[in-house]
Image: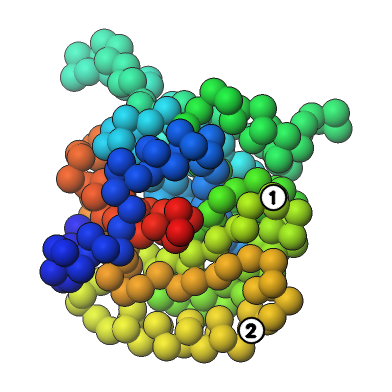
Amino acid sequence: MKTSTLPRQQLRRLLASHDEIRVWINQNGCLVIGVGMLKGGTGKTTMTIFLALYLAVMLGLKVLVIDTDDNSQTVDEWYKIRENRVDLEGNPAPEKVPFDLVTYDAKNKAEDAPELDDVIDSFRDQFDVIIVDSGGAGKEAYWELCQKAHMVLLPFAPSGFEWNRIAPTAKTAARGGKANDNRLKVFVCMVKCTGRNTLAADARPVVEAIMATKIDDEVRKKIDVAFMDKEFEISDSPDYPRAWDETPKRTHLEEMGLLFRHAMKEVIG
């Protein structure tokens, strides 16, 4: 896992503390977080799972994940693997996942099924945090999410196949953000970064240029869009893919937790 190179005091000023986050939730009600990029395979599900675990395990919050990824329902699959484990002798060894899950099939829902924004509202009073894993192709569900979210995280790997979707995703977020009672904050987050090459460093000025030239003033009137500082890039740690076979340890959650706490610092203001 990547660790920050900033001095502790300087890093602390960039982060919301656990107490500040709890106070904000007590005062403002359920925190709604979206994780979404209008492209598949960018790391949305991994970010969703690790954030949910961080908030539930490290902060003791009551967390709900809504899996809207109509391409794969991957959080749903991960959750079922955890709850249906067996021991070495084949006996049931269920593992209690510390967050709740609702699977919302945006593509195949019935005509009279509730819209995603209504589903979010229906759970607000029951949870401290709702995290929505928004599928790569679901534009309608994504902008419905953006009508309700306090923040949306846009993960992408340092590859042109992924960063070229940042501007269209921000534009769709603005469509929903226009109808949001909150000032929606969108954070572009680089993931799958490695110290073994310069891909992340090379990508950063390209992405900064894309955000400066392709995310226009009309979008920025409706939402705040920021590119996460390099101190909060997410590594390509093997602990992320291993999460399918091994339950992440508390130390494995810290990297994603730092990113969240930095974003939350902006939400709190």
Position of 145 compared to 265: left or right? right
Dot 1: element: loop
Q: Is residue 40 visible?
A: no
Q: Where is residue 215 shown, x and y percent of the image?
A: 64, 79
Q: Quadrant of the C terminus?
A: bottom left
**Residue 192: mark:** none
From the image, tell me which residue sits under label 1: 181
* Residues packed near mark 1 inside 10 Å, few (<14), some (14 to 19) or many (20 plus): few
Amino acid at circle 1:
Asp
Residue at 27% from the left image edge and 70% from the top image edge: 231
Q: Could you give the CA–CA distance between mark 1 and mark 2, rounded to whole angstroms?
A: 25 Å
- The numbered mark, 1 or 2, whose residue comes first in the sequence reads 1
Amino acid at circle 2:
Lys
Q: Where is residue 30 shown, x and y percent of the image?
A: 53, 35
Position of 261 compared to 142: left or right? left
Q: Nearer the viewer, mark 1 or mark 2?
A: 1
* Residues packed near mark 2 inside 10 Å, few (<14), some (14 to 19) or many (20 plus): some
Q: Where is residue 184 shown, x and y percent of the image?
A: 60, 58
Q: Residue furthest left?
A: 7
